[in-house]
Image (tube, rainbow, N blue to C red):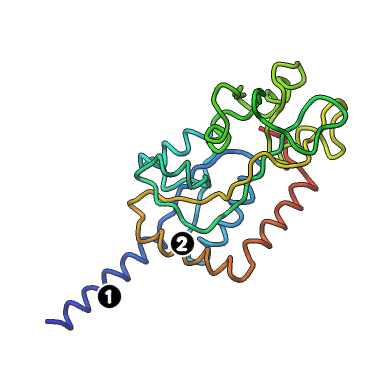
Amino acid sequence: MACRRLLLLLISALLAVATDADAQLRITGSDTMSSRVAMAVLDKAYARLGIRVEFTLVPLRRSLLMANKGESDGDLMRTEQALQEFDQLLPIKVPVQRIVFFAYQRGRDCPAHLDPAGLHFSYLRGVRVIEMTLPASSLVAASDSREALRSLQKGHVDAMLVDPLEAETLLGPGGMAGICKVAEPLIERDLFHSLNRRHAQLAVRVEKALAEMAARGEIARIWAEQNKLLAASPAKAQ
């Protein structure tokens, strides 16, 4: 009887692995420059498990809602704090990206450090790390990064918050006349992939694959390679 139970458990495990490998997961995320770095990391991690991944790009907030409802299999990357709001998402606790937001202001010489108190910032609507770090009264949401830049140029806000890759796409490699960058980043956070709870067993395997990649320095190399590629040939900002 014990042998039969063991055999059944082995068959179940093999079927679970086969189901994962045969399926194509759909992961939702947003169309930003930094998202492409995380996609490169996850492509490699899932390939190690023999799993194909399709990335569907949607507005930031919608991605989380779809993943939480099970309309997609998971969300590309978020802060731990943002994922705590969604009870159907399992964070994979190895960072797939680290996001850094700098403040950009009008003028030729920005300060090295910026105190955000009393200032108004334009930013891409739905970026939860910004919305959860700064008071809502100080934020002016934009539908895309170019709209955020226009708000700054027109003097509707005191500063624009954006990551460096997105900023280079907006301003060009040499910057833009009349816009300067505050030297010290205003926000820095690790970002984590998550899967819907129906993929609980797979989440354990993905976390192990990512942890092994991190230990070998593979994730850091992918970040460096992708950032170099994006900086050399920035895509049109969305």
Q: Look at 51% across and 49% down and name the residue there.
A: 54
Q: Residue furthest left?
A: 1
Circles 1, 2 touching at the beta carbon (< 8 Å): no
Of helix, strand and loop, which one carries label 1?
Answer: helix
Q: Position of residue 221 (x, y in %)?
A: 68, 62
How many discs appear? Answer: 2
Q: Quadrant of the N terminus?
A: bottom left
The front one of 130 and 16 is 130
Quadrant in which residue 65 is drawn: top left
Indicate which label's residue lies in the foreground, 1 or 2. Answer: 2
Amino acid type at image mark 1: Leu
Q: Which mark is residue 10?
A: 1
Q: Position of residue 192 (x, y in %)?
A: 52, 51
Direction from residue 52 to residue 124 in the image, left or right:
right
Q: Look at 57% across and 28% down and name the residue there.
A: 125
Could you tell which of marks 1 and 2 lies nearer the N-terminus? 1
Q: Position of residue 167 (x, y in %)?
A: 74, 36
Q: Which mark is residue 61?
A: none
Amino acid type at image mark 2: Val
Quadrant in which residue 134 is drawn: top right
Q: Residue beneath label 2, please? A: 206
Q: Look at 70% across and 34% down and name the residue there.
A: 237
Q: Look at 77% across and 28% down and name the residue there.
A: 105
Of helix, strand and loop, which one carries label 2?
Answer: helix
**Label 1: few (<14), some (14–19) or many (≥20) C-alpha neighbours in 10 Å:** few
The front one of 152 and 75 is 152
The front one of 142 and 45 is 142
Q: From the viewer's perspective, is residue 31 above or below residue 45?
A: above
